[in-house]
Amino acid sequence: SVIFALRHIGTDESFRLIFKAFLNVDISVTTPEAGVIDISLKGAIKTNFTTFISPSTAKGKRPKKILIREKKKGYAASKKALVFNSLPKGYDHSIYAFIKGIIPIGRVLKINNEDGANIITFNN
């Protein structure tokens, strides 16, 4: 998808693929005026980096996972580890720098969050 996006850069579909591949978020693309690309995020930026939440452990010991056990009447008990998705420090800024580098010359790119507030503007 990234190769397709780079080959067809500047099209709405290329921006959809780039944001889906790198930031795992759906977007809507509009062009309110000539030379301006307005991208609105439809949700929060997510990541595929999963981290287990664990209690403190002694040095040299393997961290233990916190397991949540759920049992419903009529169903078998299920266990899941407590996890969260983390965004490595600087990851979003490196993606924004990548996007800034591939914007066609003379275009302005505006990225808005799901509430419509501007996050970042490139080539302004």
Image (tube, helix red, strand yellow):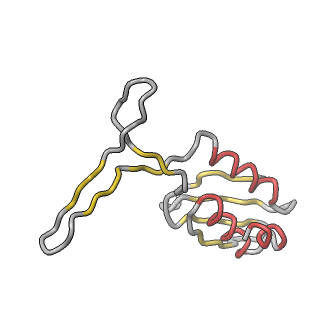
**On the picture, is 43 further left or further right than 83?**
right
Q: Residue at x 50, y 47 (%)?
A: 86
- Seen from this angle, which residue lies furthest top? 59
Q: Nearer the viewer, residue 115 or 46?
A: 46
Which residue is pictured at 36% across the width and 44% down the height?
65
97 left or right of 21 in image: right
**In front here: 37 or 102?**
102
As drawn, which residue projects farthest toward the right? Answer: 105
Q: List x then y, in percent, for residue 102.
A: 81, 59
Q: Position of residue 4 (x, y in %)?
A: 78, 73
Q: Quadrant of residue 103?
A: bottom right
Residue name at image x 19 percent, y 72 percent: 75
Relative to 54, say whether 9 is above or below: below
Question: In the rendered view of the protein, which quadrant contains the N terminus?
Answer: bottom right
Residue 96 position, x and y percent, is 69, 51
Query: Could you say which is closer to the camera, residue 14 or residue 28?
Result: 14
Residue extending furthest toward the left: 73
Quadrant position of residue 107: bottom right
Query: Residue 31: x percent and y percent?
Result: 70, 72
**Residue that lies at the very extreme toward the front in this rendered image:** 61
Q: Residue at x 58, y 65 (%)?
A: 40
> Number of callouts in the render?
0
